[in-house]
Image (cartoon, helix red, strand yellow):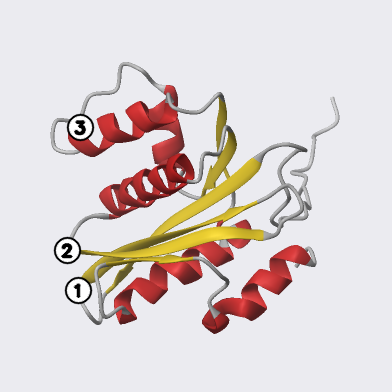
Amino acid sequence: APRMQGRRVLRIIRWESPVQGWNKLNTDGSSSELHGLAGCGGVVRNEDGQWVAGFSKRIGVTNSFAVELWGLCEGLKLCCNLNIHCLEVEMDAKSIVEVLQNAGYVNYVISPILDDCSQLITRFHNVRIKHCFRQANHYADGLARMSFRLNTDFIIYDSLPVDILDVFEGDLNGM
């Protein structure tokens, strides 16, 4: 029998708009070895890929799993406050997506924030939570990194922060 050679699959990875009538939330967590801090951020965009709202939150010292959950929790709260009904959530933390899809998962250290996320998810008429590649999550990553420079612990951006305008435009243009 002929031996099969390993095949590489080339795939285009980019941020994509949600379907008609939906909004998309991208969240991310980040930690700074320099500052010893962790922070998270997220962005909500409409079906045309246009800015709805964003946030950055400084958290302090924690692990990557917890900081990703913080990002999701804050993003879900923001979407609830914006009265969004149909929400697609994308994050590059595959472990968080898997935990949310596994109803039997128990971790007593992280349970309170995980419970908050699960409770917030029930407030939406329709919600989809998906893993995305890091390359398609640049903007949320930029907002998470901005948390290290905040004068406050939490900020909501009603308009696009100029610091990461080029990243946002790159997303819209399919970069």
State the CA–CA distance, disc 2 to disc 1.
Answer: 6 Å
**Amino acid on which disc 2 is placed:** Val
Q: Which mark identifies residue 111?
A: 3
In contact (CB < 8 Å): disc 2 and disc 1: yes
Figure check: 90 above or below 29: above
Figure check: 79 above or below 163: above
**Amino acid on which disc 3 is placed:** Ser
- Residue at figure coordinates x 57%, y 31% from the top left: 128
Image quadrant holding the C terminus, namely bottom right
Image quadrant holding the N terminus, namely top right
Residue at the far top: name it.
104
- Residue at figure coordinates x 14%, y 30% from the top left: 108
Q: Which mark identifies residue 36?
A: 1
- Residue at figure coordinates x 24%, y 68% from the top left: 153
Q: Counting residues from the N terminus, which is met first, the one under dot 1 or under dot 3?
A: 1
Secondary structure found at label 1: loop
Query: Dot 2, how many residues are within 10 Å of its Cα: few (below 14), some (14-19), or many (20+)?
Result: some
Figure check: 105 above or below 25: above
Q: Which residue is mark 2?
A: 61
Query: Dot 1, how many residues are within 10 Å of its Cα: few (below 14), some (14-19), or many (20+)?
Result: few
Where is residue 73? Give x, y as percent: 35, 44
Secondary structure found at label 2: loop
| 69, 12: nearer the viewer | 69
Secondary structure found at label 3: helix
